[in-house]
Image: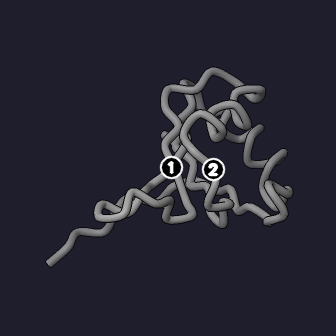
Amino acid sequence: MQNKLFVGNLPWSTDDAALNEMFSSYGEIASARVMTDKFTGRSRGFGFVEYVNEADAQKAIEALDGSDLGGRQIVVNVARPREERT
């Protein structure tokens, strides 16, 4: 399924609630999470949004990729599986 999205170039002030609010108008969200540094707790500038269905995820990509959030042009695309670490 292609319902999990990568959201990059987020402003440092963006938190999970703000990410959820921004993407919720495009469909039902299963989860929205901004990734943080495990030592400082500060945002790493990217996150993931998972929709309940694929059609809503596609609508969000089309509407939000390249849009402005807090003065930054965000990147929204389908999340790729994490590579295995060796």
Q: How far apart are marks 2 and 1 (CA)?
A: 7 Å
What amino acid is labelled 1 in the image? Answer: Val
Quadrant in the rendering for residue 20: top right
Quadrant in the rendering for residue 7: bottom right
Please rate how many residues cluster around mark 2, counting C-alpha atoms within 10 Å: few if below 14, some from 14 to 19, many from 20: some
Number of marks in the image? 2
Pointer 1 residue: 34
Instruction: Classify mark 1: helix, strand or loop.
Output: strand
Instruction: Classify mark 2: helix, strand or loop.
Output: loop
In this rendered view, identify the residue nearer to me: 82 or 39: 39
Viewer-side label of 2, 1: 2
Quarter of the figure with the C terminus: bottom left
Q: Do the numbered discs 2 and 1 sit on residues whose CB atoms are within 8 Å?
A: yes
Residue 67 location (% of width, % of height): 85, 56
Pointer 2 residue: 14
What amino acid is labelled 2 in the image? Answer: Thr
Residue 51 location (% of width, % of height): 57, 31
Task: Using the image, tell me which numbered label, if any, was put on residue 17.
Answer: none
Residue 34 location (% of width, % of height): 51, 49
Q: Is residue 18 depicted above or below 65 in this figure?
A: above
Q: How is the image coloured?
A: one colour
- Asked if residue 47 lies left or right of residue 7, the reply is left
Residue plotted at (79% across, 65% down):
72
Residue plotted at (23% across, 69% down):
84
Residue 3 location (% of width, % of height): 55, 38
> Residue farthest to the top?
28
Residue plotted at (48% across, 39% down):
1
Residue plotted at (77% across, 38% down):
59
